Amino acid sequence: MSANTQALQQGNNAANRRWFRSPADGRLRAGWRIAAFLGIFYAIALPLVFGMRAVLEFSKSSPLVVVLIALAATPAVYIARRWIDKKSFVSLGLHADRRAVADVIFGILLSGVMAGAVFSLMWALGYVGNVQIAVNGWSTVSILASSLLAMAFVGFWEELVFRGYVLQNMAEGMGMRTAIIISCVIYGLVHAMNPNAGILSSMIIVLFGYLRIYGYLSTGQLWLSIGMHTGWNFFQATVFGFAASGHAEEKTLITHDAQAASWLSGGDFGPEASVLTIPVVLLALLAMRVWSRREKIL
């Protein structure tokens, strides 16, 4: 092999290495890290979900599916973070301390206020009607508790994946501002595939994507976002009887009917398709800003 050929081959090898790996630290580039994580996630999730469905014979809409996805997402993120990113799992924003507990509780309560505010506005304006409250002793308590647990799994795995692994790797590769924009758009597109989704609902979901990201940006941890995600799904669906991103709960504390167009009442998609939700989200961002700047939490 001539010296020129050898030099050319070495140059090509170096270029290929740079294309796959960062010259700064030798790790895979951010895009490849995310692709590897997705491969690990699906490699764990698909056999787990389909295997358990074959054994237990539950439907694809069963709450157990959510639990299984969460059980798949957590080790997938851990493996990718530890051996591909070469960083610790908790560095994603999962430090467990008193602040974490306070953030989760505040996030759940704030989302409860948000859902309550949207419902109250719609009721006062006549956009929902035939409102009924169903209370049946311990049966109601059991329904609420099991729903809250299921929503906690949803809140944890989605924040761990979207605002944890994916967003933070995107930010390393392209900067936080660009990562935020792309992450929010992806979040809206993912939910655009939900039942009864439309252009307005997808745009409002993009805003919710930023709401979740702001929870991470304002505290440096994922706990506030996890709490808000959990609380919003729980209160809007199980408590106030709305559909949650197009998925309706069979048993809810409050039942009602839409009495206005979906862009006002949310329709079959839920509050995330109503323009009344937009100012509520903006006020929630302000509340999060105030909360995150408090020096003493407990």
Image (cartoon, rainbow, N blue to C red):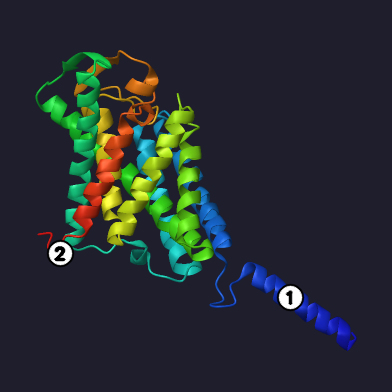
Seen as rendered, the residue at the extreme right is 2
Q: Secondary structure at mark 1?
A: helix
Q: Give the side of residue 233 with respect to residue 290, left or right.
A: right
Task: Give, as a three-letter code, the residue at label 2.
Answer: Glu
Location of residue 290 by image quarter:
bottom left
**Res. 13 in view:** yes
Q: Quick one: quadrant of the C terminus?
A: bottom left
Task: Give, as a three-letter code, the residue at label 1.
Answer: Asn
Give residue 278's position: percent from left, percent from top.
33, 35
Q: Residue at x 65, y 72 (%)?
A: 18
If you read the primary sequence from the N terminus, does the residue marked by circle 2 or circle 1 appear first?
A: 1
Mark 2 Cα-neighbour bin, 10 Å: few <14, some 14–19, many ≥20 = few
Per the image, the residue denoted by label 2 is 295
Location of residue 20 by image quarter:
bottom right
Q: Residue at x 25, y 43 (%)?
A: 284
Mark 1 Cα-neighbour bin, 10 Å: few <14, some 14–19, many ≥20 = few
Whether residue 225 is situated above or below residue 92 in the rendered picture: above
Give residue 173's position: percent from left, percent from top.
53, 64
Per the image, the residue denoted by label 1 is 13
The front one of 229 and 274 is 274
Q: Residue at x 18, y 42 (%)?
A: 109
**Res. 252 in view:** no
Give residue 130's position: percent from left, percent from top.
22, 11
Q: CA distance from mark 2 to mark 1?
A: 52 Å
Give residue 57's position: percent from left, percent from top.
42, 30
Q: Secondary structure at mark 2?
A: loop
The front one of 90 and 281 is 281
Residue 98 shows which numbered tag?
Answer: none
Q: Give the side of residue 172 with respect to residue 287, left or right.
A: right
